[in-house]
Amino acid sequence: MILLIDAGNTRIKWQLQAAASGRIDAEGAVAHEDIAALSHLGQAAASPLRVVGSNVAGAVTAARISTALGVEHIEWLRPGAQACGVRNLYADPGQLGADRWAALIGARDLHPGACLVVMAGTATTVDLLSAAGEFLGGLILPGVELMQQSLAAGTAQLPLATGRFTPQPRNTVDAIRSGCLQAQAGAIERMFRQVAGQPDALCLLGGGAADAFADLLGIPLRRFENLVLHGLAVAAAH
């Protein structure tokens, strides 16, 4: 069995696959405070368990995951210059986040043409991948909820908004919510312009916060919930 782990800033996503077939046997997510609950995965595996992961939550989280699973070795993905058909053009390839690297690998496996790889969570990442498999660069911006929290924390009169999206907001909470969603959609659409003219250009959109603004995007779009886990599966197979 292969256990895939995506240790993000807010949650730990996981997927248990049959090593030979790639069949997904189970999947789920836990909050950081509930990492101990992962222990059932190590106990339930009917065969030697191989664990492959992406971690952007730090060394302490990595150690807690290892302890919970009862395994000594986790194959944490390390960004490099090239892997699985993707060439990393970051100035320092090792500085790219492991989750972004995994998502790019997953995107390359899912779509052979140029694409924009978007993951929406605590932060939103927006990465350009050429038809030749070159990671050209990308954006990192606060996610929807983080944008709203920053307005509430940094201003005297703006609340933590519980408003709704509207094209022409006419109250403060709707103005905040709509502004944060428009900011996400606008950044994504502006980046997509760089590949829009290429054949079969596509935006691959994943992450738990993506549903909040997916309907606002006026670009070719495919939702794929677990881009990081899919990329980890591809990397593990290689």
Image: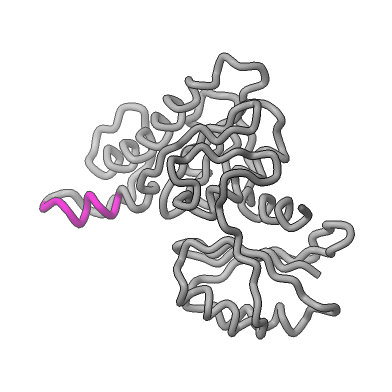
Residue 203 appears left or right of 49: left
Q: Tell me which residue sits at (55%, 36%) in the image.
A: 135
The residue sitting at 25% across, 33% down in the picture is 170
46 vs 187: above or below: below
When the figure is inspected, residue 142 is found, relative to residue 128, above or below; the finding is below
Q: Which residue lies furthest to the right in this view?
A: 20
The colour scheme used to paint the residues is one colour
The answer to if 207 sits in the magenta stretch is no
Q: Nearer the viewer, residue 164 or 35?
A: 35
Q: What stretch is highlighted in magenta?
A: 148-156
Q: Quadrant of residue 132?
A: top right
The residue under the point 53% across, 80% down is: 64
In this view, the residue in front, 11 or 138, is 138
Question: Is 169 placed left or right of 88 in the picture?
Answer: left
For the stretch drawn in magenta, the main secondary structure is helix
State the image coordinates of residue 28 (x, y, percent, origin top left): 65, 66
Using the rendered view, name the quadrant where residue 113 is placed.
top right
Horizontal relation, residue 29 to residue 95: left or right = right
Q: Is residue 124 left or right of residue 84?
A: left
Measuring from the top left, give residue 175's x and y in whole percent: 27, 37
Quadrant location of the N terminus in the rendered image: bottom right
